[in-house]
Image (spheres, rainbow, N blue to C red):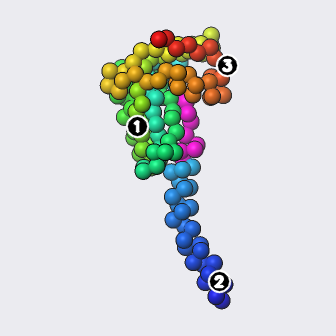
């Protein structure tokens, strides 16, 4: 009987740890690193993390055909909040994504959030299975 009580107490201690690392952490790991559309678009480089755990952030690229970088940012903030995750913008810019020619040109900056590190953006795009064979150029 004492053994059962012992294992029961271990289970009770493990529940908060499992709860902490299963839902937001799993969502963070499942989060796609790249979500961009085709054509001329604005993009943001975002750091997504579990609240209080900025050391374990995931850097993602998000880009759509929109009039402002703010639209991209606030849409992502709402989506990440639903998953229990926090978002920090690392900067933005513009992209010309020609999927038929397999070319992407990264350039420009964002008035609201400043310029993103375009070389980091290129690195993330090349790590994606969809864009790994694309010719990606960064305009200085």
Q: Position of residue 37 (x, y in %)?
A: 52, 22
Depth order, front residue of 57/79: 57
Mark closer to the chain start, 3 or 1: 1
Q: For the residues marked 2 and 3, what is the alpha-carbon distance in whole angstroms?
A: 56 Å
Which quadrant does the N terminus fall into? bottom right
Q: For the residues marked 2 and 1, what is the alpha-carbon distance in whole angstroms?
A: 46 Å
Neighbor class of circle 3 (other Cα within 10 Å; few <14, some 14-19, many 20+) is few
Q: Is residue 13 magenta?
A: no
Which residue is tagged 2?
4
Which residue is painted at 56% across and 61% down in the image? 18
Asked whether the viewer can see residue 68, the reply is no
SS at mark 3? Answer: loop
Which residue is tagged 1?
88
Which residue is tagged 3?
133
Q: Position of residue 35 (x, y in %)?
A: 53, 29
Q: Are marks 3 and 1 in contact (CB under 8 Å)?
A: no
Residue 32 falls left or right of residue 78:
right
Mark closer to the chain start, 2 or 3: 2
Mark closer to the chain start, 2 or 1: 2
Which span is picked out in magenta? 27-35
């Amino acid at each position: 009987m004492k053994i059962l009580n012992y294992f029961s107490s271990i289970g009770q201690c493990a529940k908060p740890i499992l709860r902490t690392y299963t839902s937001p952490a799993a969502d963070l790991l499942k989060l796609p690193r790249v979500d961009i559309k085709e054509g001329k678009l604005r993009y943001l480089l975002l750091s997504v993390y579990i609240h209080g755990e900025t050391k374990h952030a995931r850097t993602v690229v998000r880009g759509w055909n929109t009039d402002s970088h703010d639209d991209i940012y606030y849409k992502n903030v709402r989506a990440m909040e639903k998953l229990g995750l926090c978002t920090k913008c690392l900067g933005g810019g513009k992209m010309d994504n020609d999927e038929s020619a397999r070319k992407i040109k990264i350039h420009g900056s964002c008035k609201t959030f400043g310029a993103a590190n375009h070389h980091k953006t290129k690195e993330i795009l090349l790590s994606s299975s969809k864009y790994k064979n694309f010719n990606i150029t960064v305009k200085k």
